[in-house]
Image: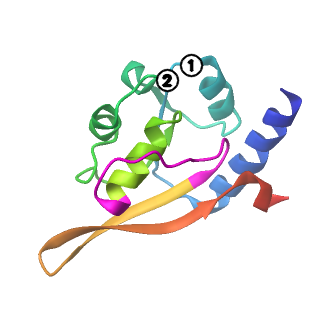
Amino acid sequence: TERGEKQAKRMAAWLHENMPKETRIIVSPAIRTQQTVEALKLPFETHRKIGPEACVSELIAACGWPDAQGAVLIVGHQPSLGRLASLLLAGAEAEWSIKKGAVWWLSNRLRRGETQTVLRAVIPVEMLD
């Protein structure tokens, strides 16, 4: 939609200013996600297994969490993105809602020998107006 295109462009502008330079971008093959990522005008990889019916383990495998070198941006779908966020932040899959067009920025760190997930930011596209 026209509204969706505007939102994608606003989020793309924010990402260009804030995401690490060498970010790997992985995208669902669905038309909507492909159209969304085009606003970034950056190279990306399409992963069949992170489509609308993806499970959390497929998202984890695609992005290489927590061992991937560098940042990874996933352009995907609900409910799998919400389930992934809940698993990484709360330790169990739950039905968390992630709004369309929002960015959830997670990182990890090692503390006292334990890997911890850190929520760095949640940016809904409406905050960028």
* Camera-nearest residue between 70 and 114: 114
Q: Is residue 28 magenta?
A: no
Q: Is residue 101 magenta?
A: yes
* Camera-nearest residue between 63 and 77: 77
On the rendered structure, is 83 left or right of 36?
left
Q: Amino acid at mark 1?
A: Ala
> What kind of secondary structure does the magenta stretch mostly adopt?
loop
Mark 1 Cα within 10 Å, few/some/many (few <14, many 20+)?
some
- Can the viewer see residue 123 in this picture? yes
Q: Position of residue 15 (x, y in %)?
A: 63, 54
Q: Is residue 82 above or below residue 80?
A: below
Give the residue displayed 55% in from the left and 58% down from the top: 19
- Return the residue at label 1: 30
- Can the viewer see residue 13 in this picture? no
- Return the residue at label 2: 52
Start-end of magenta stretch: 89-103
Question: How far is the residue under mark 2 from the one under mark 1?
Answer: 7 Å
Q: Position of residue 129 (x, y in %)?
A: 85, 58
Q: Circle 2 sits in a helix, a strand or a loop, which is it?
A: loop
Give the residue displayed 53% in from the left and 56% down from the top: 104
